[in-house]
Amino acid sequence: MAETLYEFQEALLSTDIMKARRILSETINLITFDQLIETVIVSALENIGKGWEKGEYALSQVYMSGRICEELVETLIPMGNRQKKPAPKMAIAMLNDYHALGKRIVYSTLRASGFDVLDYGRVSTEGLVQRICDDGIEVILISVLMFPSALHVKDVKDTLGKKVSNVKIVVGGAPFRLDRQLWKQVGADAVGYTASDAIDIIQSIAAGGS
């Protein structure tokens, strides 16, 4: 499977969608859909994201890799095999930040794993709270790159508390990796350090956990 992962990752980096499609088509006959997502698609996106952080890949490669994976999961895998997973209504957003890398990887991973999630893009604190209330969101995933943006999560928490009381806040991004206690300080309910963490957190919430 290591060779398959390497070839798929290389196909994504070179934006060779035909090769990427062929690799997934061949691999889905050998393993389950969940295994395909976890060992190939999620792993490839995480590796590419880490490579970008090290300066090995361009941001455009990260962006296109996520887009390709989304398209392949939607069009290649028969919908009968892509079982929707039970989960609360959720959305993902960048809070006062222009950096879409983390959000792109997590959004693609959740979608590929069978979860429905709304993409709010870049939003302000006020705009995010309004959309959460309008859409009846139960779980909001917030991605940030800069420390000041991370601190605004507390503003979201406080403002939401005046309007609704059942929204779970899940955070991720560089500031939370650097300070492992920051997520608690800003009032988040959970923190994820990888795309796989996001899947585990959503599954835990869906099962009634925190």
Image (cartoon, rainbow, N blue to C red):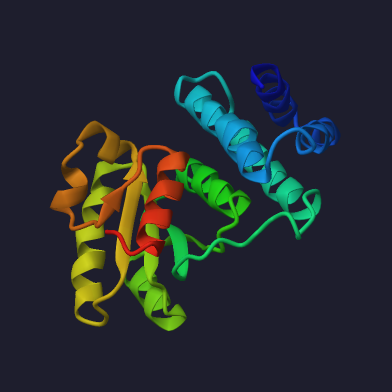
Residue 125 located left or right of residue 65: left
- Quadrant containing the N terminus is top right
Q: Is residue 170 visible?
A: yes
In this view of the protein, can residue 98 be seen by the observer? Answer: no
Question: Which residue corresponds to the image point at 61% horizontal and 62% vertical from the top-left?
Answer: 84
Q: Residue 169 is drawn in which quadrant?
A: bottom left
Q: Residue at position x 42%, y 37% from top?
A: 194
Coordinates of residue 181 in the picture (x, y in percent): 16, 41
Q: How many marks?
A: 0
Q: Residue at x 13, y 51 (%)?
A: 185
Figure quadrant of the C terminus: bottom left
Quarter of the image holding residue 182?
Answer: top left
153 vs 46, nearest the viewer: 46
Residue 197 x %, y %? 40, 42
Above-or-below relation of 160 to 109: below
Q: Is residue 43 above or below residue 101?
A: above
Q: How far across and how far down the image is residue 26, in percent?
A: 82, 33
Residue 74 lies, in percent from the top left, at 74, 54
Residue at figure coordinates x 20%, y 60% from the top left = 154
